Image (cartoon, grey):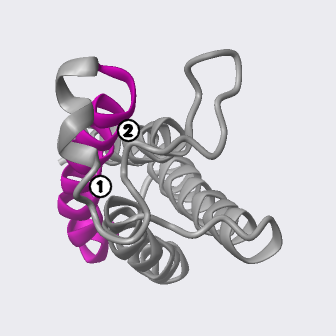
């Protein structure tokens, strides 16, 4: 594995770790109850720490292909969740999202940065890093 690929793999792992710890901070320290879509995002994010960590330790990018799939699905869920929070036409879909409505905003930094925005950004960074790894590895083959 090339040094560039290893660096990108580390970036993907570190981003997954920061996102997982961030979600735990919001729920366990600040006491914010996750909504249903937040749980789906967690289900997609938490395994990425293991997937990319194992690939990084073994230095085998092929092990992390599941990360590309999980982060791609996670991006879609995060974007949908963000639309439910910020676009009036989607907000009614968030009312019937379980015990905690999905259109509720626990945080709203600078008027647009919410928890789904943060999760979506993490998924995008992981996805793009993985695509860059694939391109780098194919270039050298």
The residue tagged 1 is 71
Circles 2 and 1 in contact, beta carbons < 8 Å: no
Looking at the picture, does residue 27 appear above or below residue 112? below
Image point (33%, 45%), residue name: 78
Residue 63: in magenta span:
yes
Question: Of the residues under marks 2 and 1, which one precedes in the sequence?
Answer: 1
Choose top left, top right, bottom left or bottom right for residue 28.
bottom right
Q: Quick check: 43 above or below 26?
A: below
Q: Is residue 140 visible?
A: no
The one nearer the camera, 57 or 141, is: 57
At x 63%, y 46%, the residue is 106
Q: Is residue 59 visible?
A: yes
Disc 2 crowd rating (10 Å Cα; few below 14, some 14-19, many 20+) is many
x and y, in percent, of residue 79 in the image: 28, 36
The region drawn magenta spans 61-87
* Element class at badge 1: helix
Q: Quadrant of the N terminus?
A: bottom left
Determine whether the residue tagged by mark 2 lies in a helix, strand or loop.
helix
Prevalent SS, magenta region: helix
User: What residue occupies the far right of the structure in this picture?
Assistant: 29
In-image side of 81 versus 28 (left or right): left
**Residue drawn at (18%, 43%) of the image:** 93
Q: CA distance from mark 2 to mark 1?
A: 7 Å
Which label number is shown at residue 124? 2
């Amino acid at each position: 594995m090339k040094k560039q690929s290893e660096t990108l793999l580390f970036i993907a792992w570190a981003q997954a770790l920061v996102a997982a710890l961030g979600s735990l901070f919001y729920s366990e320290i600040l006491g914010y109850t996750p909504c249903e879509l937040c749980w789906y995002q967690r289900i997609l994010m938490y395994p990425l720490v293991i997937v990319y960590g194992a690939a990084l330790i073994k230095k085998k990018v092929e092990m992390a292909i599941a990360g590309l799939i999980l982060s791609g699905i996670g991006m879609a869920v995060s974007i949908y969740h963000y639309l439910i929070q910020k676009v009036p036409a989607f907000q009614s879909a968030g009312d019937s999202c379980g015990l905690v409505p999905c259109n509720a905003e626990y945080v709203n930094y600078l008027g647009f940065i919410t928890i789904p925005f943060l999760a979506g950004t993490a998924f995008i960074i992981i996805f793009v890093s993985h695509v860059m790894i694939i391109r780098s590895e194919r270039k050298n083959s």
